[in-house]
Structure formats: structure tokens, C-alpha cells
Image (tube, helix red, strand yellow):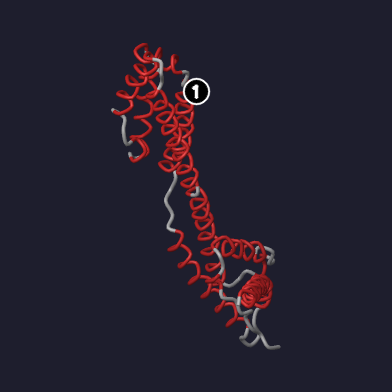
């Protein structure tokens, strides 16, 4: 019987796909009868792959957690707009024909200018700045001006958007401080090397004369999963080629 290892360029799989491939191998190889697991090098390879797979999964979770960065940037943009909205609403009263409204607008304008460039401050500094601005606007000194100009909703908008931002940013900071850091690129590189060594070892042992059933079984299980992902990559390439031809 001619034995071979199903061709698969695992390095071009996405991070998630590679993790799923390792999980599939771990699950499949775990079905081999314990009585067959008499080869020390084989068992050592499987233990290493299982351990590194667990670390790899944690690295994947970390990458997904870091996607919160986009959400944080989005909420920062929302609060920047809320500050800008308050500023624009205030400027409308500079041209009011009511002296008291003009006076109130000027007083609030002077206050706002002490908080200029909030949008370009770092995240935490901007949070503190908006907190202070809102606190001043709600104080006895300025609350009557806000009420006179009927722009309380813009103050509330700043307050709410800033609180929403601080909640997400704070949760991320706490989670980050309590979470181990994983370099997914390095872990994957190590796993690819280990995986390659393992599959070549299984293939070599399966080809030996009077090869133990363990290696024939393991090779069959490895090839089943490898073919699935090889076919997945082949379909992906085919779709890409069709799209390229259509765009010509």
C-alpha cells in the first residue's frame, strides 16, 4: 500500500482555520485506542501539540478581545461629535437679538474655550476634561445660562457619550491588566514547525516494515482533516481566479 501525507499548505490558513485544524486533529487522535499508544515519541508530539493548541486558542481570544479597540475608537468619535454639537449650538446665540441670550452665550463660550482641543487629547485625558466641563455646566454658576439657552440636551449628550466611552475603555483596561499576553504570530510559527515534524514522523513510521497500527490509524485521521482544509483552500483559489477573470 502506498502511503502519503495529504498535501496541505497550513501556513496559508487563517489564524482561526489553523486553530480549528489543530482542534480537529486533537479530537480525532483522541479516538485512538489507549492500548495502541505505545510509542513514546508519538505520545510526546501529541502532548506538545495539545498544550500549544490550548495556548494558541488563548492567543486567538486575545486577538478577538483587541477588536474592542475599534469599538473604543467609535465611541470616542461619538463623544467628540457631542462636544462639537454643544459648541455649534452655543454659537447660534452669539447672533441672538436677545441681550440676555448673547450674554449667556458669551459666558459659556469663555468656559468652553478653557476646554479647547478636547478631541485631540489622549483617551483618559479627554474623559477627565469632559467630566470637568459637564460638571461646570451643571454648577450653579452656569446652569442658569444653559437653561436660558435651552441647550441642556447637548450637555446631557456629552455626559452620556463620555460615560459610555469610559465604561468600555475601563472594562478593557481591567481585562488587559488581568490577562496574559500572547504573541499569536510566534505561537503559530512554533506550532507549524511542531506540526510539520509530527506529521512527517507519523508518515515515516507508517511506511516502515511491519508498521504498528497506531501510525496507519493516525495517518488516516490526519489525512482526513488535511484533505478537508486542502479542499477549502482550493475552492478559495478557484473563486479568486473567477473574480479576477470577471474583472478583466
Badge 1: how crowded within 10 Å, few (<14), some, or many (20+)? few
Please give the residue where the numbered disc 1 appears in the rendered image.
Answer: 153
**Side (left or right) of 52 relative to 5:** left
Q: In this rendered view, identify the residue nearer to me: 160 or 150.
A: 150
Q: Which secondary structure lies at badge 1?
A: helix
Q: Quadrant of residue 95?
A: top left
**Side (left or right) of 204 relative to 77:** right
Q: Position of residue 196 (x, y in %)?
A: 52, 75
Q: Residue at x 52, y 55 (%)?
A: 60
Residue 179's place in the image compared with 215, above or below, is: above
Q: In this rendered view, identify the residue nearer to me: 109 or 135.
A: 109
Residue 98's place in the image compared with 188, above or below, is: above
Q: Residue at x 50, y 61 (%)?
A: 52
Q: Residue at x 69, y 72 (%)?
A: 224
Q: Position of residue 55 (x, y in %)?
A: 50, 56
Q: In this rendered view, identify the residue nearer to me: 159 or 178.
A: 159
**Side (left or right) of 164 relative to 25:** left
Amino acid at each position: 500500500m502506498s502511503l502519503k501525507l495529504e498535501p496541505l499548505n497550513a501556513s496559508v490558513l487563517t489564524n482561526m482555520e489553523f486553530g480549528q485544524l489543530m482542534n480537529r486533529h486533537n479530537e480525532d487522535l483522541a479516538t485512538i485506542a489507549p492500548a495502541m499508544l505505545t510509542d513514546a515519541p508519538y505520545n510526546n508530539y501529541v502532548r506538545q501539540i495539545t498544550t500549544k493548541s490550548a495556548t494558541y486558542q488563548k492567543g486567538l481570544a486575545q486577538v478577538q478581545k483587541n477588536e474592542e479597540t475599534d469599538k473604543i475608537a467609535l465611541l470616542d468619535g461619538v463623544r467628540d461629535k457631542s462636544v462639537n454639537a454643544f459648541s455649534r449650538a452655543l454659537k447660534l446665540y452669539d447672533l441672538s437679538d436677545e441681550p440676555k441670550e448673547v450674554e449667556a452665550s458669551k459666558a459659556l463660550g469663555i468656559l468652553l474655550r478653557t476646554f479647547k482641543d478636547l478631541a485631540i487629547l489622549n483617551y483618559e485625558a479627554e474623559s477627565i476634561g469632559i467630566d470637568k466641563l459637564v460638571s461646570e455646566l451643571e454648577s450653579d454658576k452656569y446652569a442658569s445660562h444653559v437653561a436660558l439657552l435651552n441647550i441642556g440636551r447637548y450637555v446631557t449628550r456629552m455626559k452620556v457619550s463620555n460615560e459610555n466611552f469610559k465604561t468600555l475603555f475601563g472594562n478593557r483596561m481591567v481585562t488587559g491588566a488581568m490577562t496574559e499576553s500572547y504573541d499569536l504570530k510566534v505561537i503559530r510559527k512554533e506550532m507549524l514547525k511542531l506540526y510539520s515534524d509530527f506529521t512527517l514522523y507519523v508518515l515515516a513510521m507508517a511506511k516502515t516494515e511491519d508498521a504498528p497500527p497506531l501510525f496507519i490509524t493516525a495517518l488516516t485521521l490526519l489525512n482526513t482533516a488535511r484533505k478537508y482544509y486542502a479542499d477549502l483552500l482550493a475552492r478559495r483559489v478557484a473563486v479568486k481566479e473567477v473574480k479576477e477573470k470577471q474583472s478583466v
